[in-house]
Amino acid sequence: MYTPLSTGPCCSSTLIGHRNYIILRPMPLAEDTVTSRHRITSYSENTVSINETIYRQSLVITANSLHSPWPVNSLLDLSPENLAPIFESAPVVVLLGTGPQQHFPDPKIFALFGERGIGLEVMDNGALCRTFNILVAEDRDVTAAIILPA
């Protein structure tokens, strides 16, 4: 028999074995204290909430800046001009959220990031939101570009 002890969305668990049962103990994945101005507080298929403000259009966010609306409604809209707000922040890594499912952009887009020495990670928006908050809590230099449907 397994007995969970106060595990939640902010925790994973370590297993400690005993004779007849296992106790699950909470283990934090990131610090609760976030020092950045911007934090993703929730998301849905069509929205992202940053500091409790709901956004319904695509956006670019860093720990301390927000560019909204971002004129990208699909991967086909990605161009050097539309990527300018991302490149201006000169991040080490960019998280690109492609909606409810992960879809990869044209290889030319990857090349634009590679030419600038910027890492590009492509994921669905849910994974992006969770990853962004963890990296920001670790004071990592990250920019998130979130594509939301028009």
Image: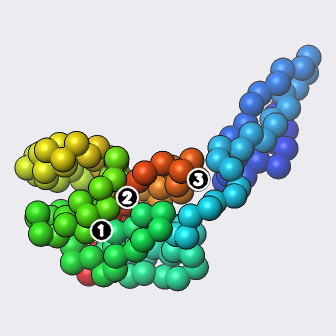
Report if residue 134 is visible in the image. Answer: no
Q: Position of residue 4 (x, y in %)?
A: 81, 42
Mark 2 Cα shell of 10 Å, populated few (<14), some (14-19), many (≥20): many
Task: Check if mark 1's residue and mark 3's residue have beta carbons within 8 Å.
Answer: no
Badge 1 or badge 3: first in the primary sequence: 3
Badge 2 or badge 3: first in the primary sequence: 3
Number of the front mark, 1 or 3: 3
Q: Nearer the viewer, residue 96 or 119?
A: 119
- Residue position marked by numbered label 3 in the rendering: 137
Going by the numbered disc 3, the residue's amino acid type is Ala
Write the residue at 24% across / 53% down.
103
Residue projecting furthest to the left: 108
Number of the front mark, 1 or 2: 2
Q: Position of residue 32 (x, y in %)?
A: 70, 56
- Residue position marked by numbered label 2 in the rendering: 143
Write the residue at 19% across / 66% down.
84
- Residue position marked by numbered label 1 in the rendering: 147
What is the spatial separation of the Cα atoms under label 1 and label 2, in whole angstroms?
13 Å
* Above or below, 39 relative to 112: below
Going by the numbered disc 2, the residue's amino acid type is Thr
Going by the numbered disc 1, the residue's amino acid type is Ile
